[in-house]
Image (cartoon, helix red, strand yellow):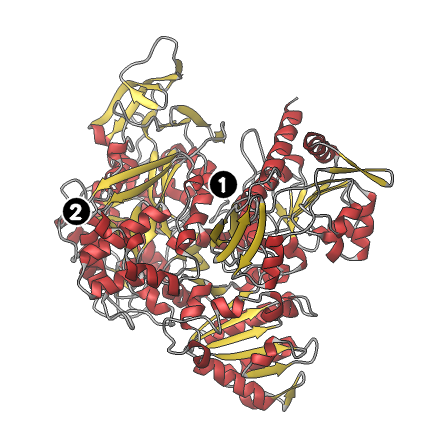
Amino acid sequence: MNVKDAVCPFCGCLCDDIEVEIEGDRLVGVTNACELGATKFLGGERLKSPIRREGKAWKEISYDEAIRYAADMLLDAERPLLYGWSGTHGEAQCVGVHMAELVRGVIDNTSSVCHGPSVLAIQEVGHPGCTLGVVKNRADLLIYWGSNPIDAHPRHLSRYTCYAEGFFLENAFRDRKVVVVDVRKTQTANIADEFVRVRPGGDYAILSALRTIVRGKTDTIPRMVAGVTRDQLIRVADLCLNAKFGAVYFGLGLTMIPGKYKNIRNAIELVTELNRHTKFTISAMRGHYNVYGSNEVNTWMTGYPFAIDFSRGIAFYNPGETTAVDVLARKECDAALIVGSDPAAHFPRRCIEHLAEIPVVQLDPYPNATTAFCKVQIPVAVTGVDAEGTAYRMDGVPIRTRKVLSSDYLSDEEVLSRMYALMQEALKR
Amino acid sequence: MTELLVKNAHVIDPLSGINGETMDIAIRDGKIVEEVSAAAEVIDARGMLTMPGGIDSHTHICGTKVNFGRYMSPEDMRAGRTPRRGPMHATSGYSVPTTYGNSYRYSVMGYTTLLEGAMAPLEARHTHEEFTYTPLQDTMANTLFDGNWSIMEAIRDGDVKRVAAIIAWTLSAVKGFGVKLTNPGGTEAWQWGKNVSCIRDPVPYFGVTPAEIIRSVIEANELLHLPHSVHLHCNNLGTPGNYTCTLGSLGLAPDLNPRRQTLYATHVQFHAYGGSGWKDFSSKSEPIANLVNMRPQVVIDMGQILFGRTTTMTADGPMEFNLYRLHHEKWSNHDVELETGSGIIPVIYRRKNLVNSVMWAIGLELALLTKSPWQCLLTTDNPNGAPFVRYPEIIGLLMSRRYRDAEFATIHPDTGSRVPLPAIDREMDWYEIAVMTRAGQARALGIQDLGKGHLAPGADADVAIYPIRIDEVDPSADYQKVIDGFSRTEYTIKRGRVVARRGECVVHGSNSTLWVRPKVSENYDMGKDPEFVEKFDRYYTVRMSNYPVQEQYLNRSRCIETETEL
């Protein structure tokens, strides 16, 4: 049996044109997906049941036991951390927020180690953006800045930008110009009409130089800025000013370098300035398929996109203090629930050392680096494969992922709802 | 079976023709009934003003742009925080509260039904998700068609039935309630960084004019027999001299529906400006109100501003960019492929600012100069003019000349020469306020037959009981009592149970979503129209099969099926 228009639960592109082939209870073929997406659909060896650490060994336990353990752990904790959320559906994220509120915990998602700085910049200067289809149908200039879609978001170019059919472009491929700004010659740089190779850490200066040129103060630009010639900067500024519709897509190459959110702020202000001359938009290349959904859910439920601390009953937000990395590095939290992410693979060593010292429960279909730090891991269904639910694409478009396979695994939402019910019951008593 | 009896209530229920009678209201299983058994729970409402639950016919509470208003504004979130308490979750936000914040604060003010003013079809799922977390009100969404490519093409081809068919397909797919046009044509032009100047200015590429869009969509709306009329945010919002454009737009509406208006024009305050620039900016509320007075087919809402900080948000992307260039605050924009757009900026309306002072006067003038309260409803275009928690202040201003004069004395001294407000003596009465805050909304939205906006047997048991003794309070003098009374109900009853009591919400609640499914013949099913399907496949970035909002997203779905002429 083939299922059409399945939704890929890998990256923020959230491609919804995937065809999967099902034989019995197995997924045997994937069409239209990129390699990353196909691998996610085809999956790997999953945990068969929840496991609990007993000394140096793992013991298989029931879902009831595992859920009870997690509920008790959170109820006993003085400063629980509920982290991850980008790799699960919105319905589960909503339960997570209610749980954090109930136990006065800190809830944070993976933005705190990816596009957190972009959120901070947006909170200072706003965000001129659009849905991906606006770019697909109109853009004649694309700027990939500190992002490398060919490797990280493989279908971004073909489905939404350079190679996608555009209503207002006669020959989309030929009529669009591509600028790539990066510190090294990436795969994406190979297809650029203009590759701007910046000296590491020089992005802020380049953005300021472009803003200066757009404002007509070209004379003040030195011959070289952060390894880039003035001539090239003028060429890029001209491309921007002469475009009918320009779109900037930036990645961690801009957010996670020195200057952090100031870089994003500068990029947004460049785009805002360009809107006085032509049409320009800017957007973040979000990583996890539903990291943006986690920001959205947190925002409508608590007021803030990430890093929310309920310890005083109200929702309190102070990135740098209430972000997961900081709460762990200060050795504050005394229990952690990890959902839909793998902090042990991404967090600084000090944070992981603390994770090793406190009880940790993880919800994940697969063993991962964080498994090594868990007391209990609860395998769940994979959203988009054997569970369905809402995900928000990198541009904010919500799409319902499909359940293409049946399995006995519970979804994140089911596991969390049972956990939440136990917690509510315990607190009533 | 659950029964409730509200005894000795002092009732104003305009749709039932009741103006200040002391009576009992019997409720069984969420509905108003003739009588209940002796076992019913009793609420003594002696001497308290009792009305149908409040209805907001134009507010921004849920969806992509509202949530982005929160996302970009931690300073606003910090300005309104409450902890988890009883069945109430924690809330944040002042001008753009979290969903629970909206729901609790509206409930405390006696509001039980809310219409989200602008939902982009492509992002409808988001609006419905937030509705689920707005548990104490029934919800519905106006759906944006202002920059819809297929509709503009059908208009260019002169095919109004096709316009109607596209609206029918879209409303059913996205579980929308009404048809919204926000700066028709302008939102498409803005995707090129342009705008349309007024209703005769053609939309780039598509060649149709806003006037053609407004007229065709009105006709299509009536072919589909939708409960609500077309809901229009006129072109040219916020610019000096825009009143001529507004008069032209309102003048386009024929009188096609005997049960309600044919055109609902929203937040008209922002569209009633005279002058050729900011220097000679002035009020043109009089010609607008005069036109409304002569045309029963038009209903407007105020879009009142109040002084202080708020957040502006609208599908009108180009307008927000212009506003950004005036205020130089942070600016967000979000264009939506093939459909519409949106923009957000925070603003502060200041008494010391002449333009803001004139704007303040215009909203009040529109309400006071429109003879029938059924034709000018109370809104702030929440949160654009002011957050909805400030509605009671507007009620106070409409009911008290003294209060208006006191406020007028504090605003920019040159305002008097530019506005007619100081010469207006009218003071509205309780009945008129009831019309402007619930009955008028129910009629304008076409939901009175669904049991909204009145207290006759069969109606939904949505009731607001205010701690105001209307026979003892002189609103003209005691306006502060009016404001306090409308700020906090003694009881808010939703679907037959008490949901809020003296400022506290007492249950978790569960909303219903009202949406429309027009029944069209096979020939007009756009889901099977080859041209429509091909266009969708080629130019949207979401597959057509993934576009419709699944029923799972509707909490207590209330589908309104309409018989159509297609």
Per the image, the residue denoted by label 1 is B101
Which amino acid type is shown beneath numbered disc 2?
Answer: Glu
Per the image, the residue denoted by label 2 is B565
Packing grade of label 2 (10 A; few <14, some 14-19, many >=20) is some
Name the foreground residue: B334 vs B74.
B334
Give the chain letter at badge 2. Answer: B
Residue B399, image x and y in percent? 29, 39
User: In the picture shown, does residue B42 fall above or below B53?
Assistant: above
Q: CA distance from mark 2 to mark 1?
A: 42 Å
Secondary structure of residue under mark 2: loop
Name the foreground residue: A285 vs A388.
A388
Determine which quarter of the picture holds residue A204.
bottom right
Earlier in the chain: of badge 2 and badge 1, it is: 1
Name the foreground residue: B451 vs A46.
A46
User: Is residue B288 at least partly visible in the picture?
Assistant: no
Residue B323, image x and y in percent? 40, 65
User: In the picture shown, does residue A254 fall above or below A214?
Assistant: above
Residue B275, image x and y in percent? 26, 67
Please report the residue visible at 39 percent of the width from the left and 16 percent of the height from the top. B1
Which amino acid type is shown beneath numbered disc 1?
Answer: Gly
Secondary structure of residue under mark 1: helix
Residue B387, image x and y in percent? 42, 47
Name the foreground residue: B432 vs B55.
B55
